[in-house]
Amino acid sequence: MKKLFLFGEVDCEKIEGLMNEIINAKGLIELYISCIGGEAAVAFGLAIFLKNRGDVRTIAFGECYSAGAIVLMGGSERIAYTSSEIMFHKVKLELELGNAEELKKKVKSLELFSKKYVTFLEERTGKNARFLKNKLKEDWYLTPEEALKEGLVDKIIY
């Protein structure tokens, strides 16, 4: 079993090193996550990669917010320490000022990404899209017990 760690923020540089470790690992991986957020698209890519690899336990260890929560959802088994807190929210995009056409393209891209994100959460939790969209309107903070009840984690470590 290989133990890996994702602490801080999710960004391309950090995930590149982590992906190399995952690719070269044999057997079960435990990925400990204490992450305050970061780049949603990078986190989503990693979550899909983990899901397709299989044999990965993702473990919320401390704060597991935003991009960290997305990564958590990629595990074949999702676990939360009792001391952890998990937070999901609507995908956000930082826009640079540009012309109207560029902004329209960014909005369309964000809408498509948001749809994929909700579909991924549906698949991972068994919750319906309406429920998830409603929850994601605001920051959705969950205790480990609430995350277990909602199907976001499979087990709690006390």
Image: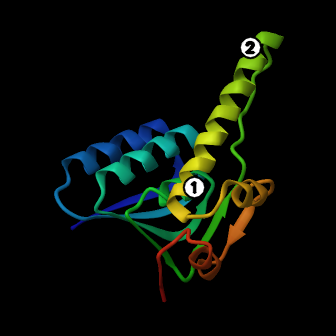
Where residue 118 appears, as percent x and y from the top left, is: 63, 49
Residue found 41% across the figure and 43% down from its top: 15
**Up/down of 29 relative to 151, above or below:** above
**Closer to the camera, 158 or 103?**
103
Is 134 on the left or on the right of 155, as rendered? Answer: right
Where residue 111 appears, as percent x and y from the top left, is: 70, 34
- Compute the Cα span from label 1 to label 2: 29 Å
Of pointers 1 and 2, the one earlier in the residue sequence: 2
Residue found 46% across the figure and 36% down from its top: 12
Q: Residues within 10 Å of mark 2 (few under 14, many from 20)?
A: few
Residue found 30% across the figure and 57% down from its top: 54
Q: Residues within 10 Å of mark 1 (few under 14, many from 20)?
A: some
Element at label 2 = helix
Residue tagged 1: 121
Residue tagged 2: 102
Q: Is residue 89 visible?
A: yes
Where residue 77 appears, as percent x and y from the top left, is: 39, 69
Residue 20 image-quadrant placement: top left
